[in-house]
Amino acid sequence: MYAVIATGGKQYRIAQGDTVRVEKMDAEPGTSVNLDNVLMISGENGTALGQPTLEGKTVTAEVVAQERDRKVNVIKFKRRKKYHRKYGHRQAYTELRITDIPAV
Protein backbone atom coordinates (compact mmCIF):
# COMPACT_ATOMS: atom_id res chain seq x y z
CA MET A 1 0.00 0.00 0.00
CA TYR A 2 1.30 3.43 -0.89
CA ALA A 3 0.06 6.99 -1.24
CA VAL A 4 1.04 10.20 -3.01
CA ILE A 5 0.92 13.35 -0.87
CA ALA A 6 1.68 17.00 -1.53
CA THR A 7 3.43 19.19 1.02
CA GLY A 8 5.76 22.15 0.71
CA GLY A 9 5.05 22.51 -3.01
CA LYS A 10 6.35 19.02 -3.80
CA GLN A 11 4.78 15.59 -4.21
CA TYR A 12 6.03 12.46 -2.45
CA ARG A 13 5.27 8.77 -3.00
CA ILE A 14 5.19 7.20 0.46
CA ALA A 15 4.49 3.85 2.09
CA GLN A 16 3.93 2.96 5.72
CA GLY A 17 7.20 3.01 7.67
CA ASP A 18 9.02 5.23 5.15
CA THR A 19 11.15 8.17 6.28
CA VAL A 20 10.95 11.28 4.09
CA ARG A 21 12.49 14.76 4.20
CA VAL A 22 9.96 17.51 3.50
CA GLU A 23 10.07 21.30 3.63
CA LYS A 24 10.21 22.71 7.16
CA MET A 25 7.00 22.31 9.16
CA ASP A 26 6.07 23.89 12.50
CA ALA A 27 6.09 20.79 14.70
CA GLU A 28 8.29 19.51 17.50
CA PRO A 29 10.22 16.23 17.16
CA GLY A 30 8.23 13.35 18.61
CA THR A 31 4.82 14.82 17.78
CA SER A 32 2.34 13.49 15.25
CA VAL A 33 1.20 15.46 12.20
CA ASN A 34 -1.67 14.87 9.79
CA LEU A 35 -0.99 15.37 6.08
CA ASP A 36 -4.34 16.06 4.43
CA ASN A 37 -3.25 16.81 0.85
CA VAL A 38 -3.56 13.18 -0.25
CA LEU A 39 -3.54 12.96 -4.05
CA MET A 40 -3.72 9.18 -4.50
CA ILE A 41 -3.96 5.97 -2.44
CA SER A 42 -3.23 2.54 -3.84
CA GLY A 43 -3.82 -0.72 -1.97
CA GLU A 44 -5.20 -4.25 -2.24
CA ASN A 45 -8.72 -2.97 -2.99
CA GLY A 46 -7.62 -0.82 -5.92
CA THR A 47 -6.59 2.76 -6.44
CA ALA A 48 -8.33 5.98 -5.43
CA LEU A 49 -7.46 9.18 -7.28
CA GLY A 50 -8.31 12.65 -6.02
CA GLN A 51 -9.47 15.56 -8.11
CA PRO A 52 -7.20 17.20 -6.96
CA THR A 53 -7.22 15.67 -3.43
CA LEU A 54 -9.07 12.88 -1.68
CA GLU A 55 -11.68 14.27 0.71
CA GLY A 56 -11.62 12.91 4.26
CA LYS A 57 -8.33 11.01 3.85
CA THR A 58 -5.32 11.97 5.95
CA VAL A 59 -1.90 10.38 6.27
CA THR A 60 -0.45 10.33 9.78
CA ALA A 61 3.28 10.86 10.30
CA GLU A 62 5.61 11.28 13.24
CA VAL A 63 8.17 14.10 13.27
CA VAL A 64 11.60 12.49 13.67
CA ALA A 65 13.83 15.57 13.43
CA GLN A 66 14.02 19.26 12.54
CA GLU A 67 17.40 19.79 10.87
CA ARG A 68 19.29 21.70 8.22
CA ASP A 69 20.79 20.17 5.09
CA ARG A 70 24.43 20.34 4.04
CA LYS A 71 25.84 23.70 3.00
CA VAL A 72 25.62 24.76 -0.63
CA ASN A 73 28.24 27.34 -1.61
CA VAL A 74 27.25 29.96 -4.17
CA ILE A 75 29.96 31.92 -5.99
CA LYS A 76 29.41 34.91 -8.28
CA PHE A 77 32.35 36.04 -10.38
CA LYS A 78 32.91 38.51 -13.22
CA ARG A 79 36.25 38.35 -14.90
CA ARG A 80 38.48 41.44 -15.17
CA LYS A 81 36.09 43.52 -13.05
CA LYS A 82 37.45 42.69 -9.55
CA TYR A 83 34.01 41.37 -8.63
CA HIS A 84 33.41 38.16 -6.71
CA ARG A 85 30.91 37.17 -4.05
CA LYS A 86 30.72 33.97 -2.06
CA TYR A 87 27.94 32.94 0.27
CA GLY A 88 26.40 29.71 1.52
CA HIS A 89 22.92 28.40 2.13
CA ARG A 90 21.62 25.63 4.40
CA GLN A 91 18.03 24.55 3.72
CA ALA A 92 15.91 23.64 6.73
CA TYR A 93 13.86 20.45 6.52
CA THR A 94 11.61 18.22 8.60
CA GLU A 95 12.16 14.46 8.66
CA LEU A 96 8.92 12.46 8.89
CA ARG A 97 8.25 8.77 9.53
CA ILE A 98 4.95 7.63 7.99
CA THR A 99 2.88 5.77 10.61
CA ASP A 100 -0.55 5.34 9.03
CA ILE A 101 -2.06 5.40 5.54
CA PRO A 102 -5.86 5.11 5.32
CA ALA A 103 -7.48 2.30 3.35
CA VAL A 104 -8.97 2.92 -0.09
Image (tube, grey):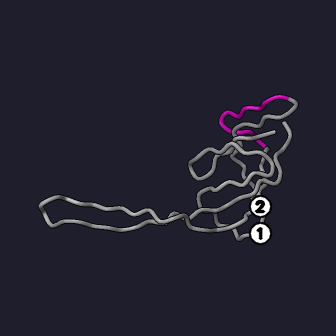
Callout 1 secondary element: loop
Query: CA gap, disc 2 to disc 1?
Result: 6 Å
Horizontal and vertical percent for residue 40? 72, 36
Q: On the picture, is 88 further left or further right than 52?
A: left
Give the left or right position of residue 26, taking residue 88 as reference: right
Under mark 2, the amino acid is Glu
Residue 2 image position (x, y, % from top left): 77, 40
Q: Position of residue 70 (x, y in %)?
A: 52, 64
Which residue: 77% across, 67% down? 31
Assess disc 1: are there few (<14), some (14-19) or many (≥20) residues with their C-alpha within 10 Å of its C-alpha.
Answer: few
Mark number for residue 62?
A: 2
Q: Could you tell me the amino acid type at mark 1?
A: Gly
Asked where in the image residue 12 lies, by quadrant, the reply is top right
Q: Residues within 10 Å of mark 2 (few under 14, many from 20)?
A: many
Q: Are marks 2 and 1 in contact (CB under 8 Å)?
A: yes
Q: Is residue 18 magenta?
A: no
